Image: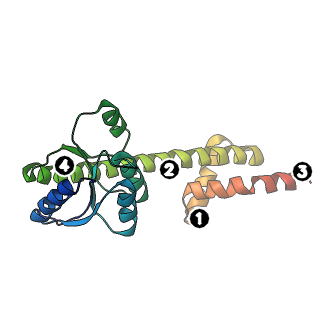
């Protein structure tokens, strides 16, 4: 891999941690840690800027899976899990956590380089899909606001649905603000407008 990364390593077995560190450094990466357990890994991820995390799945206290979840919540990075065995419970849990690759111990340098590339690639894809999903969610929320504001305008101004929509559109253009912002303002002012209408 051409890019040099700051990689957090969490491995409670010191010999494995040492071997992993030397392999990563041989690949041109900088090692953060190694952390001796999940709690230490979370603390390091919060204190330091990291590009990727390699976490042992089973560690004392907080597992690699739990640590991965907390690390990604705080600062999304690609995560590779290390495991020494096939454990159905852990595998099932891993599908619910943002894990981008896993390696079975003992790890060879020949496996490590490609695993980092795959994890980074999958992470970029995940970020893109997440961004698209968030944008879609925002559009849906905006659409709901606009629909509710249209209903208020239709009732208060006696306009048709298309007339209320055109009014919102015109206000949006005149004020150079998104329609959702205009809709939000109308909905915030609605109780006041109703009180004025009653009095």
Q: Secondary structure at mark 2?
A: helix
CA neighbours of label 3 inside 10 A, class few (<14), some (14 to 19), many (20+): few
Frontmost of labels 2 and 4 is 4
The quadrant in which the N terminus is found is bottom left
CA–CA distance in space, label 4 to label 1: 49 Å
Q: Earlier in the sequence, mark 1 or mark 3?
A: 1
Q: Where 83 sits versus 12, above or below? A: above
CA–CA distance in space, label 2 to label 1: 23 Å
Residue contact between numbered discs 1 and 3, judged by CB atoms under 8 Å: no
Q: Earlier in the sequence, mark 2 or mark 3?
A: 2
Q: Which residue is mark 2?
A: 138
x and y percentages locating residue 103 in the rendered image: 19, 44
Tally the marks: 4
Q: Which mark is residue 198?
A: 3
x and y percentages locating residue 130 in the rendered image: 38, 48
CA–CA distance in space, label 1 to label 3: 29 Å
Frontmost of labels 1 and 3 is 3
CA–CA distance in space, label 2 to label 3: 34 Å
Q: Earlier in the sequence, mark 3 or mark 4?
A: 4
CA–CA distance in space, label 3 to label 4: 64 Å
CA neighbours of label 4 inside 10 A, class few (<14), some (14 to 19), many (20+): some
x and y percentages locating residue 166 in the rendered image: 60, 50
Frontmost of labels 3 and 4 is 4
Q: Quadrant of residue 46?
A: bottom left
Q: Where 89 sits versus 146, above or below? A: above
Q: Earlier in the sequence, mark 2 or mark 1?
A: 2
Q: Which residue is mark 1?
A: 174
Frontmost of labels 2 and 3 is 2
The residue positioned 40% from the left and 57% from the top of the image is: 39
Q: Which residue is mark 4?
A: 118
């Amino acid at each position: 891999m051409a890019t040099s990364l700051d990689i957090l390593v969490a491995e409670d077995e010191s010999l494995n941690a040492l071997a992993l560190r030397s392999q990563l450094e041989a690949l041109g990466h900088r090692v953060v840690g190694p952390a001796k357990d999940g709690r230490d890994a979370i603390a390091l991820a919060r204190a330091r800027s990291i590009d990727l995390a390699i976490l042992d799945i089973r560690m004392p206290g907080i597992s690699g899976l739990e640590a991965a979840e907390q690390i990604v919540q705080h600062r999304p990075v690609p995560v590779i899990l290390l495991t020494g065995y096939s454990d159905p419970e852990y595998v099932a849990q891993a599908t619910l956590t943002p894990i981008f690759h896993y390696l079975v111990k003992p790890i060879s340098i020949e496996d490590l380089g490609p695993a980092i590339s795959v994890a980074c690639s999958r992470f970029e894809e995940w970020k893109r899909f997440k961004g698209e999903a968030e944008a879609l969610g925002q559009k849906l929320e905006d659409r709901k606001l606009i629909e509710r504001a249209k209903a208020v305008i239709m009732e208060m101004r006696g306009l048709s649905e298309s007339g209320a929509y055109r009014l919102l559109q015109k206000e949006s253009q005149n004020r150079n603000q998104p329609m959702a912002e205009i809709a939000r303002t109308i909905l915030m002012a609605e109780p006041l407008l109703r009180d004025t209408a009653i009095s």
